[in-house]
Amino acid sequence: MQFGIFSVGDVTPDPTTGLTLSEGERIALMTRVALKAEEVGLDVFATGEHHNPPFVVSAPTTHLAYIAAKTERLLLSTSTTLITTTDPVRIAEDYAFLQHLSGGRVDLMMGRGNTGPVYPWFGKDIRDGIKLAVENYHLLRKLWREPQVNWQGQFRTPLQGFTSTPAPLDGTPPFVWHGSIRSTEIAEQAAYYGDGFFHNHIFWNKEHTEAMVKLYRRRFEHYGHGAADQAYVGLGGQVFMASTEAEAKRVYRPYFDNAPVYGHGPSLEDYTKMTPLTVGTPEQVIERTLGFADYVGDYQRQLFLADHAGLPESLVMEQLEMLGTEVVPVLRKEFERRRPAHVPSDPPTHASLVAAGPDSPHHLVEPARALAEAAASSVEEGA
Amino acid sequence: MSRRVVVVTAGLTVPSSTRLLADQLAEATTAQVTARGESVDVEFVELREVAGELATFMVTGGIPTPRLTELRERVSGADGLIAVTPVFNASFSGLFKMFFDALDPDALTGTPVLIAATAGSARHSLVLDHAMRPLFAYLRAVVVPTGVFAATEDFGSHGLSDRITRAASELAAAVLSQGDYGVGGFAPDLAARPRRSSGTQVEADVTPFGDLLRGHSGSD
């Protein structure tokens, strides 16, 4: 199972000191967070993508390439890549290039972005959000899988005889997750292609996450990629730890109360009840996190939100240290203990996808279509 | 089959004139349904009791809180709605609007609604037609022709109870005619069957991906 950090890259004043990092300082902090993640034994660092203040994360592959050069093992991912407003040709090229630079330590999570005006700034309409995610991702799959692409869709200029360069490393496209909080169409999309489904998880109640993951698992099986409990599930999590629960709450409360997403709303205590937020001891975090598998099933990737809401570097690094040394080693052991043998521990990696060979379903633009046709023809032969 | 009518009332004090008007409208509606040989269960929703949850819902991008989720489901599942607000600064109260902002846009599609408002003086009476009626028109609810406005002085007049009776009669007729969709195949389905959804649950019936991909696969 993979554990890691996901960052949204917000520049938020520290509410306890009033200090705000410059954009340069914030970018440097994100880089140090990623390096620290590898140092303390975490597996994944995922960066957000936004094209409006107060965020700095407008150039994910530039940033991830820099981190790749400074790390050995760390898997680099996104949370999320804006499949709606970014030209799929650029995504295909940028991330294939990153694969080559990083030795295949790349996967991506597709998302639709959040702020209305970002769409028109890139010539798109937010009301087409789902259609853009569907069409652009389908083109992306073709660009990574077909040597020459001919394409005519609704949203970008047609392509005739286009070759995306460089081709994916070892001719093997990166594994893709699809992230969505409440759009069932995106869970369906992930299931259709046999991709991973990531639920952000941290802003809503667990019953909702459970329903979304259940839908994805059911449809993953429907499209013939394996049993429902073998589908690839990732979750977000949000924690703040100290040696006692009271101390954790004392330190974290001003950051919670002023956080951009939920600040000035529910109390820390209410939000802890309503969502997976855990503010307490490492033992409490372990217990709560292990409980996630009780409602989404045995899953493959757990990412934690660590650097946000103006938390200073000293606190962020302390959290990473505790995650890496006290929490994750126990989680690894306990999650494996409960996992049935037929349920994969890790999501597909570059190494496992290369090992599966060029004839594996991963290399098909539409694996579900091939599987459906194969099933239909075997029925005919049987008859 | 007993019908279910939900009364949403946004009064802030106890006792409140808004609740007083709501009680009278509920009673009159029950009488009108009963007079037609049918039965009705009336449930009250006091928005004051979920004011905190509504604030949480608004500032968290819609996090579902237990009591609000239940109310959203009850309102969208109702056969009829009576909506009563006090007038604050020339319109419905903020609390009243917050509740309807928390509903799914499809939550009231085709639902018969009786609108009513209270205020200190008759100068506010156009709130019914300039604020409330457009709100429910947007939500594709069916607002009955008679709205009931009660200024403080109206509680001592005969005209108010006449208007209450007329409005209740219109609501009762609309509630009881629900589900009468006509003969299948003789009208377009969309018009015949309003689709209502509380928006509180993850829809189990997902659009198959083949339908989502149609026209977007680059070659068709």
Image (spheres, coloured by chain):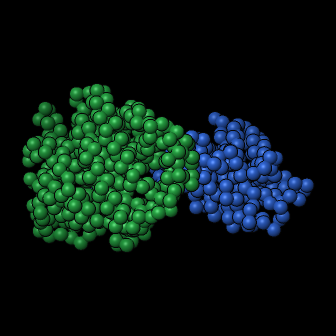
Residue at 34% x, 67% y is: A24
Give the blue chain's letter: B
Q: Which chain is green?
A: A
Whether residue B166 sits left or right of residue B200 in the image: it is right
User: Relative to residue B42, is residue B19 depicted above or below?
Assistant: below
Q: What residue sits 11% from the left and 68% below the top?
A: A161
In the image, residue A130 above or below residue A193: below
Q: Quadrant of residue B35?
A: top right
Instruction: Count numbered badges in the picture.
Output: 0
A288 w.r.t. B12: above or below: above
Choose between A181 and A379: the one closer to the eye: A181
Q: Nearer the viewer, residue A86 or A65?
A: A65
Left or right, A144 with reference to A334: left
* Image x and y of residue A74, in percent: 22, 49
Does the rendering let one see residue A198? no
Quarter occupied by the N terminus of chain A: top left
Q: Looking at the image, which residue sits at the far right? A: B156
Q: Position of residue B110 (x, y in %)?
A: 58, 52
Q: Seen in the image, is A40 located left or right of residue B116?
A: left
Which residue corresponds to the image point at 70% horizontal and 43% vertical from the top-left? B44
The C terminus of chain A - image quarter: top left
User: Which one is nearer the viewer's eye here, A346 or B91?
Assistant: A346
Picture quarter containing residue A43?
top left
Examine the rendering and report whether any part of residue A98 can be seen: yes
Locate residue A271, reporting x and y percent: 52, 44
Residue A164 pos. (x, y %): 14, 64
Residue at horizontal 41%, vertical 33%? A283
